[in-house]
Amino acid sequence: AVPGMAALLPHMHPHWAEQMRVRGIDALESVMWKAATPIAARPDFRDPGGGPPGGSLDLLRAQALDGFGTAIGICNPLWGTAALFSEDMASELCRAMNLWLARDWLDREPRLRGAITVAPHAPDQAAAEIERCAADRRFVSVLLPAMTELPLGRRAHRPIFAAAERHGLPVTIHAGGQYRHPPTATGWPSFHAEDHAAQANIFQAQLLSLVYEGVFVDHPGLRVVLLDAGIGWLPSFLWRANKTWRGLRAEVPWVTRSPADIVREHVRFALQPLQGPPDAAGMQRLLDHIAADHMLLFSTDWPHWRFEGRDAVPPQIPARLLPALLRENALDTYPRLRETIA
């Protein structure tokens, strides 16, 4: 978590640092993760000193690295830079966030890797920032919000995907985002609980956009990782996507395989929050429906409140999946991890 604007000012161009001071912009909290909400952090994960959830490197070491026996942890900083309407200001803040992440976190903890934060509404500047950060091999992915001005498959975003593919970086898409549009098709909800639940629909829309707009056709080496998406909705979504494609495939002749096959090849899902059946038999049926044991990536979602104690891997996950879930799937999805993991 970015502790506040003061942490980023040393990494910003003097003009933009002055603009932050003049305009009084001192915080850009993610709408999805207001610090005071219970789900934002487990009680035992909160900073006893009152700092923001996820803002302490010492707590990360103790709770998410040592606590779970984690060899490599990927930091996905969530801050509201993408919500800024100014493309230049948003891009400058993203650059400052990446510099801050490298200095204050990656330099101080060799087990950490970083995601490159970029502004999706400034794709040319986002691509340039990917090029700049890619020289630092500790950056292993590109981070985008799920809620964007345009569907991610639209051609305006292609410079981002091209740069990511060129450097072997998966694009990670996290819940929340720019909030240019309501999270539901019927307008703005009243409560955070509605917004939170509606994120599944947003991920579905973005997946369809990526498939039907031909992103994976133009960028066959690209991998996409969905963070905070859950997987309980995936079987019915893949069934509906395949059914619709069979009847309407004539309008997208470049999609020569079923959407389910494309998703299984190119898309991965973080384990937390699981949001699947609570029993082993039900979980096995779900995994059989998506027919892709290789699609799950271990995650703790630290510091968010997803589970109690050390149960980052839910007990209903089949034991046979653990070698892939805990190691091999990540090494396959994030090629740069193989440079330090034998």
Image (cartoon, grey):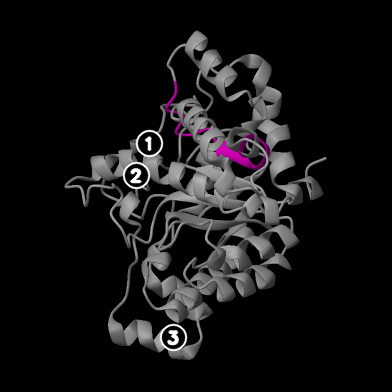
Return the mark for residue 16.
Answer: 3
Q: Is residue 262 magenta?
A: no
Residue ID for mark 1: 305
For the point 47% across and 69% down, which residue is it? 121
Which amino acid, mark 2?
Answer: Ala
Q: Position of residue 199 (x, y in %)?
A: 37, 43
Whether the residues at callouts 1 and 3 have beta carbons within 8 Å, the answer is: no
Sequence-first tag of 2 and 3 = 3
Which amino acid, mark 1?
Answer: Trp
Q: Is residue 248 visible?
A: yes
Q: Which residues are magenta?
A: 263-276
Q: Position of residue 18 (x, y in %)?
A: 39, 88
**Neighbour tally class for label 1: few under 14, some 14-19, many 20 plus, Cα within 10 Å:** some
Element carrying mark 3? helix
Q: Is residue 272 magenta?
A: yes
Q: Is residue 130 above or below residue 227?
A: below
Residue ID for mark 2: 40
Whether the residues at callouts 2 and 3 have beta carbons within 8 Å, the answer is: no
Q: Position of residue 276 (x, y in %)?
A: 44, 23
Sequence-first tag of 1 and 2 = 2
Foreground residue among 115 and 100: 115
Relative side of 292 to 307, left or right = right
